[in-house]
Image (cartoon, grey):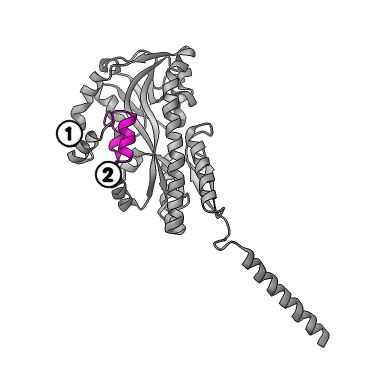
Amino acid sequence: MFTRKIIRGTLMGLTALAALATVAGMPKNSTAQETLKFGHVYEVDTPYHRAALKASELFAERTDGRYKIEVFPASQLGKEAAINEALTLGTIDIIYTGVAYLGQSYPPISISDYPFAVRGYDHWSNYTKSDLFAELSREYTNVTGNAIAGLVYYGARHVTSNKPILTPADMKGLKIRTPNAPAYQMFPKETGANPTPMAFSEVYLALQQGVVDAQENPLPTIKFKKFYEVQSNINLTGHIINSLIMLVSPSTMDKLGEEDAKLLIESLQEAGTEASNEIVQNEKELAAWFREQGVTVNEVDRGPFIDVIAPRLKSSDMPWDPEIFERLQAIKG
């Protein structure tokens, strides 16, 4: 009996020593790995998905593997409205979404999605670094709790159709698919077209079957969604300089704590910048590529279109104070 007690006591002591040795050998901040969910609606061969994967890689490195971001592309976790709701509920940690969606909660932040409010890429880039964008972001976060990691360049939106669109008069009566948001519907409404909201996933078939006559998107999107297969003309209207926003759930920010939340935001921003640069480069090359595919790419004088839209942007029924619009226009670029 005495011998068994000695043996049992020795074993317990060795077990305790082994446990202490294991703890001593662990990194100071070591914990079980946690997984964050990043949901978006874009295909795996887009710069946006590659940027999400890059952010996952960067965040894992910067937290010594304590966190992993699992990316769910192509609406695997739901379409845009669904992932926005899931972010609010905390069942998704990170999403890409359009500026117009943020405008549903805090209308002034949607200003950059309105036609001709942003002049081009340089103006857009300077806006993303401006005090104005920082202020609008803070106000949006105050309203929703969602944290804005940053803007990603989506591209200049152009009209595709089966006829040339060279003047505002050419838009008259055109049934054109747009997202279901006032920012996207203003351009066709003011030029006499008929905006037709429709889910992004339904657009190709609707164009093919003639349910709608036209659609509008940036050149990279026109390529990866293959809209050029069912439209003969790409008209370089450049009427909206489009953005995606990377959002982080408030519950996720709380869970991470200040230091790790900062590392997440930095990782998302760095990856987002890479995606923006890739889109800019693609835009420079794609007009020639589309022409090689037999598509007619029409250069468009944007001046007459701007003249039609400009009075609306300064009208009193816009979802921002006039001072915000003036500050945006004062940004260089």
Q: Is residue 83 above or below residue 156?
A: below
Q: Give the range drawn in magenta.
A: 109-131
Q: Is residue 187 above or below residue 95?
A: above
- What residue is at 42 percent from the left and 51 percent from the top? 249
**Quadrant in which the N terminus appears:** bottom right
Q: Where is residue 70 in the image (x, y as percent from the top left)?
A: 54, 46
Which label sits on residue 61? Answer: none
Question: What amino acid is labelled 2 in the image?
Answer: Asp
Magenta-colored segment: predominant secondary structure? helix
Residue at disc 2, secondary structure: helix
Mark 1 to mark 2 CA distance (whole Å)? 24 Å
Q: Mark 1 points at which residue?
A: 315
**Quadrant in which the C terminus appears:** top left
Q: In this view, does 21 lie above or below 141?
A: below
Give left or right: position of 5 versus 259. right
Q: Position of residue 264 (x, y in %)?
A: 46, 50
Visible residue check, residue 273: yes
- Mark 2 surroundings: few (<14), some (14-19) or many (≥20) residues within 10 A: few
Q: Where is residue 72 in the image (x, y as percent from the top left)?
A: 53, 42
Verify whether residue 38 appears in magenta: no
Which label sits on residue 131? Answer: 2
